[in-house]
Image (cartoon, grey):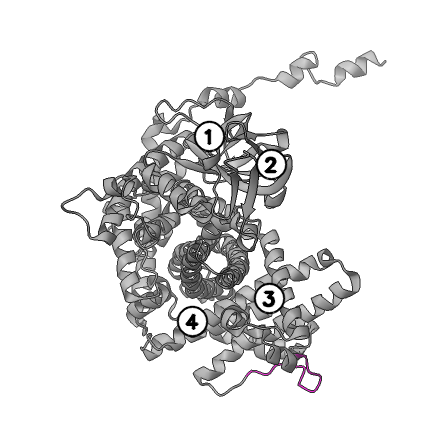
Amino acid sequence: MTRGSTVNPDSPVFNPKKFLATERDNSKINITQLNHFLESTPENSRLVRSLIDQIVNDPILKTQTNYYDNEILKEREQTLKKIARLSLYMEQDIKTVRHSFRNKDLLKSLQDEQENANTLTNKDISIFDKRLSLIAMIDPQLSTRVGVHLGLFGNCIKGNGTDEQIKYWLQTKGALFIKGIYGCFAMTELGHGSNVAQMQTTATYNPEDDTFIINTPNLTATKWWIGGAAHSATHSVAYCRLIVNGKDYGVKTFVVPLRNITTFDLLPGISIGDLGKKMGRDGIDNGWIQYKNVVIPREYMLSRFTKVVKDPQTGVPTVKTQPQLDQISGYSALLSGRVNMVMDSFRFGSRFTTIATRYAVGRQQFANTKDSPETQLINYPLHQYRLIPQIAITYLISPVAFDLLDNYYTTLEELYTASSNKSSSASLDLVSKKLKNLFVDSAALKATNTWLVAQLIDELRQSCGGHGYSQYNGFGKGYNDWVVQCTWEGDNNILSLTAAKSIVKKFVDAALKGKYNSSLDEHSFDYLNPTNIMKIMSTSSSPYFEFKEGGGEDDNQDYRTIWGVMLVKLIAHIAKQIRKTNDPDMMSKSLVMVSKFHSIQLMLKCFETKLNNKKTSDPKTREILWKLYKLFSLYFIDKHSGEFQQFKILKPDQVTNVIQKKLLQLLPEIRTECIALTDAFKLPDEVLNAPIGYYDGDIYQNYFNEIIQNNPVEKTEAGKPPYVDLLLKTLHRGYTFDEALGGSSDSSILEKLSK
């Protein structure tokens, strides 16, 4: 039965449409204000809507359910076609920001080597960055393939190159416009991933001809998992050990050409291979690279913080460095990816919570009595517990994602200014501290939120039952594409440990030395204020936390404050154990928890700050947002109730009678607005790309039609499979077993012989 032949409006197939329409009619909240809250500002909301509208209506960029059936080479070819299309949008977006569509060729002037003052800024590419972020939600392999070139290759040059190198590689050579050259990020090796400091590829300076010789000294030094290497990249930024006069100066970054930009032939000394099929994102051409005596000019070393200088008289080379920034400069390219993955977490979360929520409202299963109608999934308390906290998680990610992005751009601008020759050591020291805080926040938030969304996708896939397992409803490919976020640009466990160790150090400095810089640390680490630590750790204060019951918005802060108390007590315990054993690795499990808890309290703080600015003025809308805020906190307190009792923050009966009681009360209250809350993401069907989650709620017809469209019955003759001969041979086989025994299994023959 197809959509056109359905004539009975009372058929159960139409119930989902009626259910969703009723939910929307009964909603009392302001979806526009919710969307403005989620997208940070009304202006940004309008821009996002405009960009999504362009993407889903573009004949090349749009993605449909047949996307789920692509084979690896087809995926890569389609992805390349989309990259070509995006490069045109890149030019348009830059011209839009510059208001430059007349009188001169802007791109040509930006690539002109003589116009040194005409340099691109972060503002110039702000629209395209947002466009790429939205594409990540729809076609993540496309955004990654472009992101490796612009975000990793490009940002490595921006973060480590001199002003002249940045202009040369990104503008004059055309990398920033996706023309001229295409780059890859050759950091990870077969034998080392997160441990960048131990990379083995070498760059040995040759003073005779003022060059570097790049070498892969052994198999484990092979550059591995390099996106773009297998098919696309003409150039790499390679992480290599700088060797000068026989001395190892540690890992630095070098631009190393890979292919002839005219013929695409591999250059001498370059070996490249394809890593083949992966768990997801097959549109990315990941490959391996080996360098054998590859010669590059000295100027190809990215030299903003470390440079090799050859004495003009003696010819003796020396290495000059800015030690305050050089130590962290090598990781600067990864910052962009980590920051964007927090935003990706919000986008992916919004997509899959929308699909699962609409399905839960439209789907009916089982009846309470023989004559009563079947119950909607969303009305089962267990289903509410599985689904509604995932909506809260998505809502809580949004403010912290925008806050982190703003902090990233601000800090990077300060870094570029501070690393100029005219800057004082004080300004270098300040930006170094800001960068370290940014590394902590981005590492913790990247790890925590990519984990949360991986769990979200799988939990919601299961909540959609068998239909959630269909590839055409997006969960399978969505999960496979997503979970690499938990591994690349910093394994989540390693990032969590790194962030937590820095937080523990801040605690020790504050608790034992009274060192606390409020201007630097108040935003993310206010719970480490020495006064706050003393209050929490004081034996005279109550060991148990009490929620206020006043009902005012000021009392909502308790839901964040309790996480600060938890963090102080947990970190104090960790610090004590480390002092005893002098072995931080023994506390790794607890350190990972510190990173997660830091992220939770920061997400609550950013949400609280944003909601307190009163721009969301509608009372019912503010009320539902505060309920999501409370639910988020309570959900994770309940998940970690053992730790809250272990450190005497909550009593066992408080967990039962306060935490779990409040949690279970909030679920049905938020359930009444679940469709409006997910409609507020304003994601068109073309973005969701899952027929059980389309806006009209026509679950069964939409799903059936997509199945028929992608798997037409006409493909096979009268339903015969292509391997029908083998099937018939199996079904119509003779009595092979009996024939092998001599033609009969009649035991009477043996009985006669035995007499």
Measured Cα–Cα span from mark 3 to mark 1: 43 Å
Measured Cα–Cα span from mark 2 to mark 4: 61 Å
What residue sits right under mark 3 in the picture?
639
Going by the numbered disc 4, the residue's amino acid type is Ile
Whether residue 24 is in magenta: the answer is no
Task: Classify mark 4: residues with Cα within 10 Å, few (<14), some (14-19) or many (20+).
Answer: many
For marks 3 and 4, the one nearer the N-term is: 3
- The x and y percentages for residue 755 are 86, 13
Going by the numbered disc 1, the residue's amino acid type is Ala
The relative height of residue 511 versus residue 684 in the rendered view (above or below) is below
For marks 2 and 4, the one nearer the N-term is: 2
Q: Nearer the viewer, residue 366 or 597?
A: 597
| Mark nearer the viewer, 3 or 4 | 3
| Mark nearer the viewer, 3 or 2 | 2
Which residue occupies 74% across, 68% down?
576
Mark 3 vs 4: CB contact within 8 A: no
Q: Nearer the viewer, residue 292 or 475?
A: 292
Quarter of the figure with residue 674: bottom left
Measured Cα–Cα span from mark 3 to mark 2: 50 Å
What residue sits right under mark 1 in the picture?
230
Measured Cα–Cα span from mark 4 to mark 1: 48 Å
Going by the numbered disc 3, the residue's amino acid type is Lys
